[in-house]
Structure formats: C-alpha cells, structure tokens
Image (cartoon, rainbow, N blue to C red):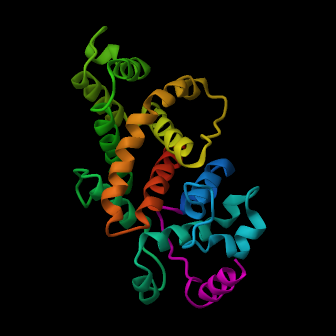
Amino acid sequence: MVGKQMIINDFCKKYLLWHRYDPDLEFLKNCENEDLRILVDYLTKDKDGESRWTESLTYSEPYKQYYPHNISAMFPSIAKELQRFGGDSIANLFRGGGVLYREILIDVAKAAKVNFNKDSSTERIEELYLQKIMEDAIEKMSPNQLKEFIEEFGGESIIGVGTISMRAAHEVLKYIIKGSGLKFYKLSVIIANSVAKQLLGRGLTLATNTAITKGLHIAFAWLGPVIWVITAIWTIKDITAPAFRVTTPCVIQIIYMRAKI
C-alpha cells in the first residue's frame, strides 16, 4: 500500500494537476454533500468497497481535507478525476488532463445505443440516455412491475385506467421525458437510487419531499430490470474501456443531481 501511494503521489505531482474547466460540471459545487459522496465513492471504490487501483482522488489534499463532510469544496478535484477516467491515460498526458463530461456522456450514450443528435444540449442527451435505460428495462418488467410503473407516474390520465402493457408503459415514459420536470426528476431518483443500492449497498439520502419519496418503495421492484440493462451496457464497453464501469454510474448520478438542481 505504501508503494502504491508513493507511485500515485509522484504521478499526481507530474501529470494530474490539471483540471479542465468544464461548464457541464460546474454545478457540482452547489450539490448536496451526500449526493456528491456517492459520486466520489463511484470514482474511488470498486463493487467490493475496496479502493480502486486506478484512482488517485483519495491521495489528493482536497480529499483528505474535505471528505466526507464538505465534499462540495473539492468539486474541482472530483471533476478532474472523472475527466481522467473518461479518457485514455496516455492521451490525457498530451492533452493536459482528461476529457470533458459531455464527451464522457456521449461515449456512455453511444454504448447504450441511444438515438441522439450530436448537436443536442448536454441536458437533452442526458434525458435520452435515461429514457433508453427505462425503455430497455420496461422490456424486462413483469406485468406487476409494469402496473406499478404506470400507476406511479399517473399513467391513467395518459393511456386510460386499467391499460397495462409494455406499449402503454412506453407511452408513459415518453410523457415523462417530454415533460422533463418533477416526473423526470422522480424517474432519475429511482434509477440513481437503484444503482447506488446495487454498487454501494446504500441508496440516496433524500429530503422529506413526499412527492418524490412516495414512490421510492418501487425502486426495489425495478432494481432487477434497471441493473440488468446497465450491466449489459458496461459489459459491452468493458472490452475496450475498463473505466466504463466507473463512468456509467457516475453519469447516472450526475444526471440525477442536475435534475435535482
């Protein structure tokens, strides 16, 4: 462990001092501590809770000073670490840092076979990415899960009372994404909560907003379909990009936090 720390400290001093200004990540400094803690844990811990061999964030001074109680104060370091995971290590040295979040998002979206316009806003690509996750998850849902999904988002007013089918669920999903308001935020909460439960063993810490927390009980019912989809996405990409297992949950957490802001 001492040898690893010496190597990483030296590498950080030489090559990882750069933080590329990233307008799509600036909002992190305004996010809640516990939400940021999940993002940091995705970057620094593997699925067994052990430190990632490829991470450098825990060796930085901002991490030692601000984690886990004042994480927003270290947001440049968080952005830098995410940018580094999103790019090739050698290429990062020549460009003076990793890749911007938008490029990471596009990489993740392409792997999920999301249909999007490359000129679309970052927020729009994020919406379409969550839509694709849920489209694929709906295909794996049981009749009871479909019923819960439709009812939870007020689908009766869109497709009629008692209409339960995959087609109906897809119509409700389109309505959620198109509205891009409270219902979209609620969807992002449920997906991000499911991923955090699976990877970290804990869910999101939410304020007492009954409009949101009311539906979190069904996150457990969706856990299987959602995780199956996300696992399939990062398994495909893992062949050429091992860091994809890190960037995929990070993107999902960032989408949730942006929707919350």
Residue 206 located within the stretch drawn in magenta = no
Q: Nearer the viewer, residue 240 or 171?
A: 240
Q: How many marks?
A: 0
- Above or below: residue 202 compared with residue 243: above
In percent of width and height, residue 41 lies at 61, 57
In percent of width and height, residue 186 lies at 48, 33
Among the 4 quarters of the image, the one containing residue 60: bottom right
Q: Residue furthest top?
A: 161
- Above or below: residue 255 compared with residue 86: above
The range drawn in magenta is 1-25
In percent of width and height, residue 187 lies at 44, 35
Q: Quadrant of the N terminus?
A: bottom right
Tell me: 130 left or right of 210.
Answer: left
Can residue 68 be seen here? The reply is yes
What residue appears at the point 31 percent right and 31 percent down from the top-left corner?
A: 138
Among the 4 quarters of the image, the one containing residue 226: top left
What residue appears at the point 32 percent right and 70 percent down from the top-left corner?
A: 240
What residue appears at the point 30 percent right and 8 percent down from the top-left corner?
A: 162
- Above or below: residue 229 compared with residue 116: above
Q: Nearer the viewer, residue 16 or 194?
A: 194
Residue 3 located within the stretch drawn in magenta = yes
Tell me: 233 left or right of 10.
Answer: left
Can residue 120 be seen here? The reply is no
In percent of width and height, residue 143 lies at 32, 19
What residue appears at the point 47 percent right and 53 percent down from the top-left corner?
A: 249
